[in-house]
């Protein structure tokens, strides 16, 4: 990946690798009982953690490549959505955009499987806003692009992990935590800046967060998942959806200056 573009075919190949790694993580995290316990003792899966550690830099690079690829494809895909309906095949230009649409779908599926690796490595209940920010190297645009890929896929899609719905719920709750003030100061203990300087940094962080949520298309994708889980995932889904609405409200409350600007992402 460091020497080649993440094309559609290469994205599918990497997705297959993530699927294998996810399957190994499921087996490693599952408690062994009976006869399987003896087999697991003879053949341990401890090496999976070592493999993840060895691949950490490559996974970081992969996340960045996915983000860049999705950003490049947004323009052509948006243009295809605006094409008028044409009944004459000879005058229909949709075929010229199909490659870009297929490429974006492959990258979004890869996003879902890559986050599946991360979620299963740490355990879905342990997924948090801070953890996802660390995974994305505190790059909000990159993180939001990956989350959009996860949310853009339907939980019932058989090409995705069987627990995609659970992962989407955990991701929705983690997304709601991105407004936490401490995330604006990942490398600071708060002692080297005045209150006014810290407030400026926090305002800037919230502005970047707003822009990332809107510009990557995460807002619409996350809203659709939140609405779906509010009605079809029981009490836990309703709670996660309520927290997401609280996240949207927090952006408006904590960034009042942005909301007053017509060109700001909050106003949009």
Image (cartoon, helix red, strand yellow):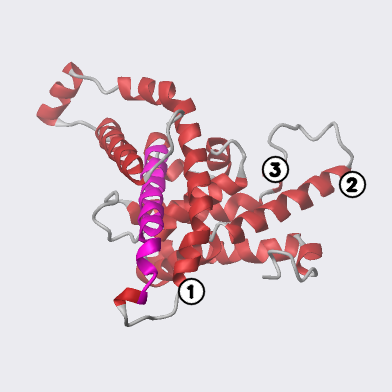
Looking at the image, do the residues carrying marks 2 and 1 touch, with CB atoms under 8 Å apart? no
Image height check: is 11 above or below 43?
A: below
Residue at 52% over, 51% down: 72
Residue 174 visible in the picture: no
Looking at the rendering, the stretch of residues picked out in magenta corresponds to: 91-119
**Residue 117 inside the magenta-drawn segment:** yes
Residue 180 visible in the picture: yes
Which of discs 1 and 3 lies nearer the camera? The answer is 1
Outermost residue on the front side: it is: 90
Q: Tell me the distance, in whole angstroms, between the alpha carbons under discs 2 and 1.
A: 45 Å
Which dot marks residue 94? Answer: none
| Tally of numbered tags | 3
Q: Looking at the image, tell me whether mark 1 or mark 3 is earlier in sequence order.
A: 1
Q: Residues within 10 Å of mark 1 (few under 14, many from 20)?
A: few
Q: Looking at the image, tell me whether mark 2 or mark 1 is earlier in sequence order.
A: 1
**Badge 1 is on which residue?**
82
**Badge 3 is on which residue?**
182
Which of discs 2 and 1 lies nearer the camera? The answer is 1
Q: Tell me the distance, in whole angstroms, between the alpha carbons under discs 1 and 3.
A: 41 Å
**Residue 81 inside the magenta-drawn segment:** no
Quarter of the N terminus within the rendering: top left
Q: Position of residue 59 (x, y in %)?
A: 45, 32
Rendered image quadrant of residue 213: bottom right
Looking at the image, do the residues carrying marks 2 and 3 touch, with CB atoms under 8 Å apart? no
Looking at the image, do the residues carrying marks 1 and 3 touch, with CB atoms under 8 Å apart? no
Q: Position of residue 17 (x, y in %)?
A: 30, 35
Q: Residues within 10 Å of mark 3 (few under 14, many from 20)?
A: some
Q: Looking at the image, tell me whether mark 2 or mark 3 is earlier in sequence order.
A: 3
Which dot marks residue 196? Answer: 2
Residue at 57% over, 67% down: 245
Residue closer to the observer: 265 or 191? 265
257 on left or right of 12: right
């Amino acid at each position: 990946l460091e020497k080649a573009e993440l094309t559609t075919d290469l994205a599918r190949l990497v997705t297959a690798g993530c699927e294998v790694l996810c399957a190994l993580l499921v087996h490693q995290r599952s408690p062994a009982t009976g006869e399987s316990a003896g087999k697991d003792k003879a053949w341990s899966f401890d090496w999976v953690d070592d493999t993840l550690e060895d691949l950490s830099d490559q996974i970081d690079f992969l996340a960045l490549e996915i983000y860049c690829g999705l950003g490049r494809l947004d323009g052509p895909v948006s243009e295809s959505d605006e094409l008028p309906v044409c009944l004459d095949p000879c005058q229909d230009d949709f075929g010229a955009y199909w490659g870009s649409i297929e490429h974006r779908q492959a990258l979004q599926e890869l996003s879902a499987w890559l986050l599946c690796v991360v979620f299963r490595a740490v355990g879905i209940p342990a997924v948090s806003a801070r953890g996802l920010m660390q995974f994305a190297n505190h790059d909000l645009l990159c993180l939001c692009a990956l989350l959009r890929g996860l949310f853009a896929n339907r939980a019932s899609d058989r090409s995705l992990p069987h627990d995609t719905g659970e992962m989407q719920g955990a991701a929705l709750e983690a997304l709601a935590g991105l407004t936490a003030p401490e995330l604006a100061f990942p490398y600071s203990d708060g002692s080297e800046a005045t209150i006014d300087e810290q407030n400026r940094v926090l305002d800037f962080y919230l502005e970047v967060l707003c822009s990332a949520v809107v510009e990557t298309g995460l807002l619409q994708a996350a809203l659709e998942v939140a609405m779906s889980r509010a009605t079809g995932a029981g009490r836990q889904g309703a709670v996660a959806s309520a927290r997401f609405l609280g996240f949207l409200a927090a952006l408006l409350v904590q960034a009042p200056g942005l909301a007053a600007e017509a060109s700001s992402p909050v106003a949009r």
